[in-house]
Image (cartoon, helix red, strand yellow):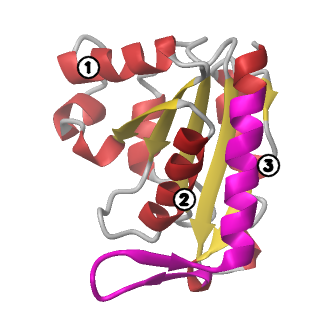
Amino acid sequence: MANIVIISGSPSPTSRLTGVLAIVAEELKEQGAVVQTIDVRELPPEDLVYTKFDSPAIKEANRLIAEADGVVVATPVYKASYTGVLKAFLDLVPQKGLEGKVALSLAIGGSFAHLLVLDYAMKPVLAALGAQHQLQGVYTVDSQVNRLDDGRFDVEEGVAARLRLSAQELVKAATKL
């Protein structure tokens, strides 16, 4: 059974990224994975800003990552890159914290103009953390995820299918390690 950690780099609880991650988490669980989530926005801000490696919250987040077989790193795109809060957290992950793990990047942005954020921003930072096995990421445009009045999200079926397939590939790759 694969142990997967989802790292959400969204600073907002109402982000459309939440809808994307719900599909991924559901599919991971359906594939038999144990799924845990690190919502970076819920970590103590002072721990992130002052890079408190010894913080109990940061230690716990890093423990989850250390015990994982696979990691999903997800972010909205701001100014053609991942969020600052995600960067602050990744700076606190040990130098080789993703070594021996399968990584999957997910990003959501305002237009397809930021599609390359997966290749030019996410891949290098994850590689710097030791992720040698990175699956092809999934980029979603905001207009493909609609926020419903009841707080849920409606994700276009084509995008949802790609997300499910990526989650399946992640579990398959993580169980082979």
Residue 52: mark in rendering: 1
Secondary-structure class at tag 2: helix
- Which quadrant of the view contains residue 116? bottom right
Question: Which amino acid is tagged 2?
Answer: Ile
Which residue type carries mark 1? Answer: Lys
Location of the N terminus by quadrant is top right
Query: Is residue 91 one of those drawn in magenta?
Result: no
Classify residue 31 as left or right of residue 60.
right
Query: Bounds of the magenta span?
Result: 144-172
Give, as a three-letter code, the residue at label 3.
Answer: Asp
The disc at residue 119 is: 3
- Compared with 76, 4 (above or below) is above
For the residues labelled 2 and 3, the Cα–Cα distance comes to: 22 Å
Q: Quadrant of residue 98?
A: top right
Alpha carbon separation for disc pair 1 and 2: 32 Å
| Mark 2 or mark 3, earlier in chain | 2
Q: Position of residue 70 (x, y in %)?
A: 62, 26
- On the question of residue 78 being in view, the answer is yes
Residue at left 38%, top 13%?
63
- Observer-side mark, 1 or 2, equals 2
Q: CA distance from mark 1 to mark 3?
A: 29 Å
Residue 121 on image: x %, y % = 69, 47
* Residue 23: mark: 2
Which residue occupies the foreground of this view, 152 or 1?
1
**How many tags in the picture?**
3
Mark 1 or mark 2, earlier in chain: 2
Q: Residue at x 47, y 66 (%)?
A: 19
